[in-house]
């Protein structure tokens, strides 16, 4: 079952671009992670890490780049997720430019949970 | 004459921290630049760059680090500026943790304007 | 026809890690790009950009993460490429830890060429 | 007593630049930190962190920017250090472009040591 669509606005600053004039390709993975952190909640991520020793790790990420995004734009990160198994969440992210007819960048990303010894753990119950 | 205090909230994500557990020191320069971009306005920065070929460049930055900032925190970037001459803006930035008794990081930063040939230009009139 | 394997050593610094203790996932895209720049040659990339107005853009990137990489490690980025068509280069990157039995991270990445108007252009002849 | 001059070559990649065409100002703090890590030794930094719970933290950094550095350049990071007290190392970094008549960027940086509770500790004996 796929979740509702979550929206996160991301402002593009100098730091985000490279000398080609558009956002550096790796940075979209940052925006998508910010989106996931807002869905799960940073307070809960901190609690899981400090109290239970559980962290999330990216296992797989498939990115498609359709259009460049420029300095000064305010983009909309659209995010959904689903549980693939008790060990894996599948996230769908899209970065949309204002007035865009399709996404500028999309990503399917698989997330797993690891304990402090980097052993796989089931995804804990999340209040989302 | 020193400007009013501008505030910019900055959420600390995974990308911001390093393996010591706190925000990587160089990243505060990013947050301070984001703050300046909000004060000047990204639309105006884009216009100056595209239409007039004028960009801002950092000439000097003096940073003091007083306290580490951790993953999940929401910090407040407090910013003021003044004109030192027609060629130089002096910015004062501070990063404050919630409930902090003093800044976690502060910065005095000098900004100049350059044209496309990297020649010094007077600061253009800014609607701020 | 797949190229020979190119090797690029990458030292992992504080800046590369996050508070979970391992390299931040997005950074591998940086290391893979560094590897491509060494294969094509930065001087040639500069020349193409300045003289012909041609730049490379990532069109697709499929990443698999198998193991975390820690601060202080020296990893080996192994890279091959092939031409998929006159418009597309397909790159295979792997990040290997010292003594590793398999890659820590792998990536299949599609690269295209764009002119200054972001229009698709054939890959120029490369002396590689 | 000031140390000898240490040299670290740094290649400027896409990731290092921003849309103004030159290296993003915050990135020089990264290059300077890489230089310090090579002087102290990453193996020793790892050992101090894991075995003794001691990490280095930046306390103060004064940066001067004199010239932009472009994509594709190979710059030379020149580094010296001295002990200001048993609690503080003062580092002097300069980034030099090939054939440059003065530094492009310079930095005076104060480094202290913290334990796992973020308490100040004397700088441990370093084999440098």
Image (cartoon, coloured by chain):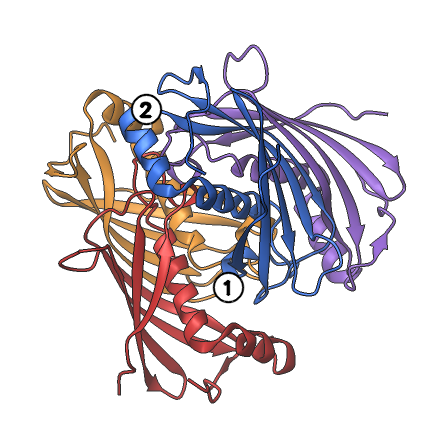
Chain colours: A orange, B purple, C red, D blue
The percent position of residue C50, horizontal first and vertical second, equals 64, 76
Chain ID of residue with mark 1: A
Q: Residues within 10 Å of mark 1 (few under 14, many from 20)?
A: some
Indicate whether A84 appears above or below D69: above
Q: Residue at the far right: name it.
A: B86
Q: What residue sits 30% from the left and 56% below the top?
A: C75
Q: Are marks 1 and 2 on the same chain?
A: no
Q: Nearer the viewer, mark 1 or mark 2?
A: 2
Chain ID of residue with mark 2: D
The percent position of residue C51, horizontal first and vertical second, equals 64, 81
Q: Quadrant of the N terminus of chain A?
A: top left
Indicate whether B98 appears above or below B49: above
Residue identified by numbered label 2: D53
Secondary structure beneath dot 2 equals loop
The percent position of residue C122, horizontal first and vertical second, equals 46, 86
Left or right: residue A113 compared with residue C54: left
Left or right: residue A62 compared with residue C27: left
> What distance separates the C-alpha of mark 1 from that of mark 2?
44 Å
Left or right: residue D68 compared with residue C101: right
The part of the image, by quadrant, that contains residue D84 is top right
Q: What residue sits 59% from the left and 41% below the top?
A: D80
Q: Is residue A99 visible?
A: no
Residue sitting nearer the eye, B2 or A41? B2
Q: Quadrant of the C terminus of chain A?
A: top left
Q: Residues within 10 Å of mark 2 (few under 14, many from 20)?
A: few
Secondary structure beneath dot 1 equals loop
Q: What residue sits 29% from the left and 46% below the top?
A: A80
Indicate whether D126 appears above or below B68: below
Q: Is residue A126 visible?
A: yes
Residue identified by numbered label 1: A68
The percent position of residue B48, horizontal first and vertical second, equals 76, 54
């Amino acid at each position: 079952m796929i979740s509702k669509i979550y929206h996160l606005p991301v402002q593009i600053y100098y730091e985000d671009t490279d000398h080609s004039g558009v956002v550096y390709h790796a940075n979209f993975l940052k925006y998508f992670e910010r989106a996931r952190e807002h869905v799960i909640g940073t307070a809960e991520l901190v609690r899981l890490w400090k109290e239970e020793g559980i962290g999330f790790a990216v296992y797989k990420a498939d990115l498609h780049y359709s259009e460049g995004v420029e300095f000064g734009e305010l983009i909309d990160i659209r995010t959904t997720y689903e549980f693939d198994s008790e060990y894996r969440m599948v996230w769908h992210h899209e970065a949309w430019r204002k007035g865009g007819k399709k996404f500028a960048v999309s990503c399917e990303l698989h997330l797993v949970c690891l304990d402090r010894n980097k052993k796989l753990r089931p995804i804990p119950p999340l209040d989302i």
